[in-house]
Amino acid sequence: MKGTCLCEAVTVEASESKEFEACHCGICRRWGGGPLLAVHCGNNAAFTGNESIATFASSDWAERGFCKNCGTHIFYHLKPTDEYIIPLGLFQSEGNFVFKGQVFIDQKPSFYEFSNQTENLTEREVFEKFGA
């Protein structure tokens, strides 16, 4: 899969993955103005235009990357596992994604609701599953 930021200064390539998740945690909602819809790309995501990527340590275990030029969110990076979670919107030319799950479902505000049937994990379940 290939994607790019708005100004095309940064590109990302990752192995094909057709499943995505929504994160409802307060940090993701503050970062993007709503839930983060993203694809787990493991540790094989490759970026070009690295000089245009700025990072922010959003927790002890993760950092978020964004384009310095246009502000596009590029990645959520889990440091302990070196996993990259890439916003779904970067992959504009890809199609047929499947909405797999929702995390931090207990932090989702009541004013929106997805109708898709997904696996839903609370904050506690996320930390148990991923060992954070």
Image (spheres, rainbow, N blue to C red):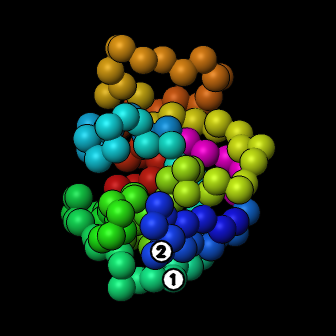
- Tell me where the magenta segment starts and ends, as one range: 17-21
Q: Is residue 131 above or below residue 4?
A: above
Mark 1 secondary-structure assignment: strand
Q: Is residue 7 above or below residue 125?
A: below
Q: Residue at x 49, y 38 (%)?
A: 22
Quadrant assignment, res 44: bottom right
Residue 117: in sight, yes or no? yes
Q: Residues within 10 Å of mark 2 (few under 14, many from 20)?
A: many
Amino acid identity at mark 2: Val
Q: Which residue lies furthest to the front in this view?
A: 7
The residue singled out by tag 2 in the image is: 10
Q: Residue 16 versus residue 12: which sits nearer the camera?
A: 12
Residue 48, numbered label: 1
Residue 73, numbered label: none
Q: Which residue is drawn at 43% across and 43% down?
A: 36
Measure how far apart labels 1 and 2 are at the Cα level.
Answer: 6 Å
- Image-based side of 69 in relation to 120, left or right: left
